[in-house]
């Protein structure tokens, strides 16, 4: 199976298959006649695994580590458990940060409703953002 067929099989872009090949997660055979890369069932399984792992939040480095252990005949399951806990904690932290960002954005919208539009002058580009940033810094210092 060539890149185009593999990409179609998994409903992904050809560039995605090429990227995973370029970084070594996929290892297709290469035709001596025309240089085309061919992906066998094993490579299809690896791609299915990569896509599933990415969907669960595993990084490329995580997947490389998992493949390395698997390729050595070791069970990667303990590593997978540790990594998913790490990714979960990171996701929880990002969720908290996104909530804080949402709150700042809501505050900005509410504050800006009462403020006039102004043309740029001196070093001020958009007073809405710059005044809001100053107010936020003042609040943090208090």
Image (cartoon, rainbow, N blue to C red):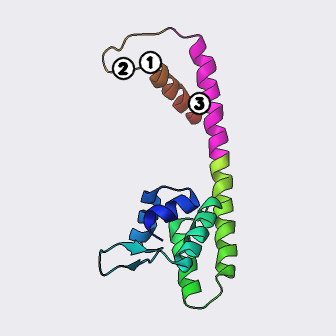
Q: Residue drawn 38% across and 69% down?
A: 22
Q: Nearer the viewer, residue 68 or 50?
A: 50
* Residue that lies at the very extreme toward the front in this rendered image: 33
The residue under the point 62% across, 45% down is 97
- The circle drawn on residue 127 is 1
Disc 3 vs disc 1: which is toward the camera?
A: 1
Distance of mark 3 from mark 2, alpha carbons?
Answer: 21 Å
Residue 3 lies in quadrant: bottom left
Residue 51 percent across, percent down from the top left? 59, 64
| Marks 2 and 1 close (CB-CB < 8 Å) | yes
Q: Say what secondary structure mark 1 lies in.
A: helix
**Closer to the camera in the image, 56 or 116:** 56
Within the image, what quadrant is residue 136 found in? top right
Q: Which mark is residue 124?
A: 2
Mark 2 vs mark 1, CA separation in Å: 6 Å
The image quadrant of residue 140 is: top right
Rendered residue at 58%/78% (across/down): 66
What residue range appears in magenta?
A: 96-116
**Pointer 3 with pointer 2, Cβ within 8 A:** no
Quadrant in the picture for the C terminus: top right
- Give the residue drawn at x 59%, y 13%: 113
Q: Earlier in the sequence, mark 3 or mark 1?
A: 1
In the picture, measured across the screen, residue 33 lies left or right of residue 47, that is: left
Between the C-alphas of marks 3 and 1, the distance is 18 Å
Q: Position of residue 79 (x, y in %)?
A: 64, 78
Q: Secondary structure at mark 2?
A: loop
Number of marks present in the image shown: 3
The 10 Å Cα crowd at callout 2, few under 14, some 14 to 19, many 20 or more, is few
Circle 3 residue: 139
């Amino acid at each position: 199976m060539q890149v185009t067929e593999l990409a179609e099989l998994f409903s992904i872009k050809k560039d995605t298959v090429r990227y995973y090949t370029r970084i070594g997660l996929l290892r297709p055979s290469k035709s001596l006649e025309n240089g085309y890369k061919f992906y066998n069932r094993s490579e299809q399984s690896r791609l299915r695994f990569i896509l599933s792992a990415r969907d669960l939040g595993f990084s490329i480095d995580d997947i490389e580590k998992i493949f390395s252990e698997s390729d050595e005949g070791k069970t990667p399951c303990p590593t997978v458990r540790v990594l998913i806990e790490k990714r979960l904690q990171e996701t929880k932290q990002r969720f908290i940060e996104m909530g804080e960002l949402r709150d700042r954005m809501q505050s900005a919208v509410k504050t800006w409703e009462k403020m006039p539009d102004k043309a740029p002058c001196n070093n001020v580009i958009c007073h809405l953002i710059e005044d809001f940033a100053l107010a936020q810094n003042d609040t943090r210092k208090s």
